[in-house]
Amino acid sequence: MSMTDPIADYLTAIRNAIQAKKKFVDIKASNLKRDITQILLEQGYIKDYANYDDGVQGIIRIFLKYDEKNRNAINQIDRASTPGLRKYAGVDKLPRVKSNLGIAIMSTSKGVMTNKRAKTENVGGEVLCYV
C-alpha cells in the first residue's frame, strides 16, 4: 500500500529550494501547511508567503530568507512525526530544539503552535517538525 506524507513533502520542497538557492518555492496548499508557514513567518525563518488560487487546491508561494552572505535563515528542517510513527509530547515533556535556539512546531488541541507557545498555553500534542 502506498502512503503519502504531505508535511514531509512540504518540508522537502523547502529544503530543496534552500539547497538550490531559490528565491521562492511553490507548494500545494492545505490548512495545516498554511499554519506551519505562518509560524515560520512569525519566527523569522522566511521573508513572506502568498496564497494563490489555482482553481483546484491552491498554492502557497514561500519567499525564502537569506542574509548578506547568502546563507538561509533555516539551517535544518526535519519531520518529527510520520504517518507510521506519530510522536506526541505532553506539556511536561515538550521538546527542546538546539538548546532552545530552534523551534518545534506542534499540532495541539488549541491549534498549530511552537513548543514555546505550547508551554505557555499549558498544552501538549503531536510534534510535527523541528526547525
Image (tube, rainbow, N blue to C red):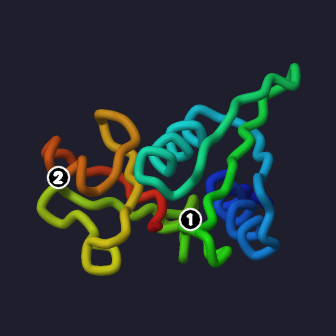
Q: Give left or right: position of 17 versus 76.
A: right
Residue 109: x and y in percent read: 30, 36
Q: Secondary structure under badge 1?
A: loop
Q: Which residue is mark 2?
A: 119
Q: Position of residue 97 (x, y in %)?
A: 33, 74
In the figure, is residue 32 to the left or right of 96? right
Label 2 amino acid? Lys
58 lies left or right of 11: right
Question: Left of 60 or right of it: where is 123?
Answer: left
Local crowd size for mark 1, using a 10 Å CA cut-off: few (<14), some (14–19), many (≥20)? few
State the residue at coordinates (64%, 61%): 11
Q: Position of residue 26 (x, y in %)?
A: 79, 47
- Indicate the quadrant containing the N terminus: top left, top right, bottom left or bottom right: bottom right
Q: Nearer the viewer, residue 60 or 73?
A: 73
Q: How many numbered marks have been drawn onto this rendered protein structure? A: 2
Query: Is residue 79 or residue 61 the one in the foreground?
Result: 61
Q: Amino acid at mark 1?
A: Gly
Above or below 119: residue 112: above
Element at label 2: helix
- The answer for how far apart the CA atoms under marks 1 and 2 are is 26 Å
The percent coordinates of residue 16 (x first, y second) are 76, 70
- The picture quadrant where one finds residue 18 is bottom right
Most extreme residue toward the top is 55
Q: Residue at x 58, y 37 (%)?
A: 34
Q: Is residue 22 above or below residue 101?
A: above
Residue at 72% from the left image edge and 59% from the top image edge: 9
10 Å neighbourhood of mark 2: few (<14), some, or many (≥20)? some
Residue at image x 40%, y 41%? 112
Mark 1 or 2, nearer chain start: 1
User: Which residue is disc 1 drawn over?
Assistant: 84
* Number of the front mark, 1 or 2: 2
**In the orientation shown, which residue stands out farthest toward the right?**
55
